[in-house]
Image: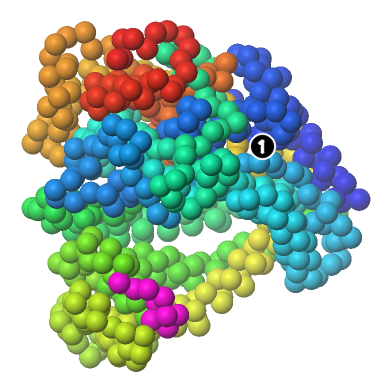
Amino acid sequence: MKRLFISIALSLAVLSPARADEGMWLPVLISQRIADMQAKGCRLTAEDIYSVNKASLKDAIVLFGSGCTGEIISDQGLLFTNHHCGYSFIQKHSNVEHDYLKDGFWAMGRDEELPNPGLTVSFLERMEDVTDIILEGITEEVEPAERDSLVKVRSAKLVSEASAKGKGLSARVEALYYGNQYFLFVYKIYRDIRLVGAPPSSIGKFGGDTDNWMWPRHTGDFSIFRIYAGKDNEPAEYSKDNVPFRPKKSLRISLAGVSDGDFTFVYGCPGTTREYVLSDEVRYVSEVSDPAKIALRTQRLAIQKKYMSQDQAVRIKYSSKQANVANAWKKWQGESKGIRKMNTVAGKQEYEARFDEWAGGTGYEGLTRKMHRLYSEREPFFLAYEYYNETVRAIEILNFASAIHSRLRNKDAKDGYAGAFFKDYYQPIDEEIFTAMMEGFGEGVSKGLLPNYYTDKLQEYGSVEAWKKDLFSKSLFTDRDKVLALGPDDKAIVETDPAYEMFDAFRKWFETYIKPVVDRLNKEINLANRQYMKGQMEFNKEKVFYPDANLTLRVAYGHVEGYSPADGAWYKPVSTLKGIIEKDNPDIFDYDIPQKLRDLYAKGGLDGQPVCFLATNHTTGGNSGSPVLNADGDLIGINFDRVWEGTMSDYVFDPEVCRNVSLDVRYLLFNISRIGNASYLFKEMKFTGGSIKKYR
């Protein structure tokens, strides 16, 4: 009876009117949102957006790698995504002689497109509600361990059956609403993905860390890849004999542009949101976790920047690493500020008080009190877990030592991995980060939870600095030749190395004293969250309950609109090339644009060239690279960011300031033609709303 009620509640939640433009909707259920979308300007049908019976927009969307989105824009497998999504692959192809990060890369023919080992794109074949199959016979009386076992067994069976039905298929069962609903997602995965084009980083990363998460934005955040397949159009490993993939659907590109108030929707794979959690989790994030991680990463970034500014080779080595560190660092700052500004913790506490008052006699009484206790018990252990990730795991030589040990133990090839490590390694950076992170670890982790290994080393050496000097002077993992000379029988040598010894000591501490407690409490919290989610749906029947993001395909819709970041200020929703020129400064790396762009602008007529735009679509990490579509489903932009003031939208959505930032597709086309001289690519694209001649 309870499960029947929840099914009804889920259906009602989907049918309820949306609060502003909040929500990340499952495409398979988009028929239950399409009326609202059409009322706001959409001219498509539900079948146009998602169908398993005919080609639909879903067939032009891919999960790019393991954490971004991409879109197919030609019948020859051409794909757009963000520059920052393709950044690590561009970096791998770069060196001092061929600096594709600095100069950009443009293949002038298929034979010049560069392969990217390890890169995949995944097409969603279908999604299916399998809740009845997964939860058949599972009542509230079933013990949690037995329930989990049944769910795993049934999920594995569904995954196995679905994956066996075709070449390149992969499936997974995902829990929604904290395990109150389950969906099967079936993907077809392609593994031969080649780099076609990327602008110089002075365009693709224009504004760098300074502008990241900010508005106005002027970043040409795009890169271009092509999917290759076997001659049967099925997934195949890289081969020179492979041919461009022929998609079921590719997107048309609109040249009409955007105007304030235009309907837009984002079709992509948002990563993680936590809309329905208790106040304790939000308080921990905004008041404890985010501030601690921000402080640690501020130190790492300062160390990296110091050396990168002194040496071009070091800059190339650490560009991708630094970008990975900086992205979350700045996001966390906006997130914690936004949570505080919206009084989110107090608001949730007030909501929980009302829930508790309602809960009497419903079976949910005492639930939030139990959850408060679990969160309190978990906090010092979870903070130690986060410090471990942000400090020990940030020291490159330690992770390298562990990886080599693993390869020797498993008799895996190590030379290629070692070569790639040393190609992008600079020891002075790692040494300074070692000192900063180990000092931070000692200050941040509760004294009673510090590893004996850590306290013993400090007692032995007297300081982290002395410990660092000894480790780096004695470890063989600072010497490329010594690492390459290791053989399968040298595992014992590695195990006596101070870098491996340190990594292993911290790993054992983590796995023995921290992880088991965190895992146990997380299990209890997740179980309580499943009950709390059900309770919320019963308590608040009028609320819109869309499932939290989990890197599965979603639709978010809204409209083009600016916002007010502070009293007396209003940001327009569109930025232009004029703003790039205003920011241009050859003395500041993040604002030093290519001379070619300066020369083009000097000829006149480009002040109004659009660059980026804002909309109210609900997005998060994973939506990077997602297509932004107009009312007819044509591509108008590529999502790449959110505004800083709205980064708390993973926990609470504020329609006044939550805005997604997108690259205007017309600036992308401008760069292909005017910067990359690669307008030959236009021949395989389809355009609407204007003539492409102006970009040739």
Closer-to-camera residue (325/380): 325
- Image label count: 1
Residue 414 lies in the magenta stretch = yes
| Percent x, y of residue 70 | 47, 37
The magenta stretch spans which residues? 407-415
Q: Residue at x 22, y 66 (%)?
A: 422
The answer to whether residue 626 is left or right of residue 13 is left
Residue farthest along the right direction in this orientation: 1
Query: In the picture shown, does residue 363 fall above or below 624?
Result: below
Q: Is residue 367 in sight in this rendering?
A: no
- Which quarter shows the C terminus? top left
Judge from the rendering whether residue 197 lies leftward or rightward of residue 675; answer left or right. Answer: right
Instruction: Identify residue type, mark 1.
Output: Leu
The residue drawn where x is 43% and y is 29% is 638
Which quarter of the figure has residue 408?
bottom left
Residue at horizontal 29%, vertical 26%?
A: 678
Q: Which residue occupies the foreground of this view, 644 or 77?
A: 77
Q: Residue 228 in the image: state x and y as whole percent.
A: 47, 42
Q: Would you say residue 332 sits in the magenta stretch? A: no
Front one among 393 and 316:
316
Q: Position of residue 204 (x, y in %)?
A: 28, 35
Question: Of 354 and 448, which appears nearest the observer?
Answer: 448
The residue to which callout 1 is attached is: 26
Horizontal side of 249 relative to 175 (left or right) equals: left
Which residue corresponds to the image point at 76% horizontal and 66% vertical from the top-left? 153
